[in-house]
Amino acid sequence: MDNLSELAQELIKFEHDNDLNDNEVAFGSHLSVERIHDIKSSNSAATSEEAELLQRFMQSK
């Protein structure tokens, strides 16, 4: 997991710890499932707005 961004690693851990899947995170953060996949795989970096939405969602749990 060393080649993943900090946000991707945090998101993967968050999903595991909270028993959530990508669909649930996408719904809760108002991002598409495809964006969640891209961010988690580090295929593309999250924009600052996307990172903020994900952080806000993770803090709400």
Image: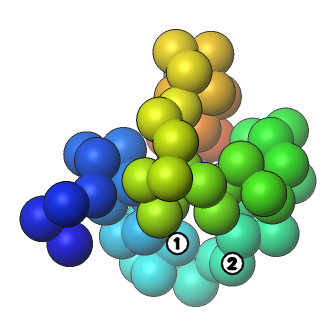
Q: Secondary structure at mark 2?
A: loop
Amino acid carrying mark 1 in the image:
Glu
* Residue name at image x 60 percent, y 55 percent: 38
Q: Is residue 29 above or below residue 42?
A: above
Residue 23, how many percent across, how many down? Answer: 82, 69
* Residue name at image x 19 percent, y 60 percent: 3
Amino acid carrying mark 2 in the image:
Asn
Residue 34, how many percent across, how many down? Answer: 78, 57
Q: Residues within 10 Å of mark 1 (few under 14, many from 20)?
A: some
* Residue name at image x 52 percent, y 72 percent: 15
What's the CA distance linking mark 2 and mark 1?
Answer: 6 Å
**Count of labels in the image:** 2
Q: Secondary structure at mark 1?
A: helix
State the residue in front, 40 or 29. Answer: 40
Looking at the figure, which quarter contains the N terminus?
bottom left
Q: Report the residue marked by disc 2.
A: 21
Q: How is the image coloured?
A: rainbow
Residue 50, how many percent across, how many down? Answer: 63, 27
> Are circles 2 and 1 on residues that touch, CB within 8 Å?
yes
Q: Is residue 39 above or below residue 19?
A: above
Q: Looking at this rendering, what residue extends furthest in the top direction?
A: 48
Note whether residue 10 is visible.
no
In the image, taking residue 13 as reference, residue 50 lies left or right, namely right
* Residue name at image x 71 percent, y 70 percent: 22
Q: Report the residue marked by disc 1.
A: 15
Note whether residue 4 is visible.
yes
State the residue in front, 25 or 3. Answer: 3
Q: Looking at this rendering, what residue extends furthest in the front direction?
A: 43
State the residue in front, 26 or 39. Answer: 39
Which of marks 1 and 2 precedes in the sequence?
1
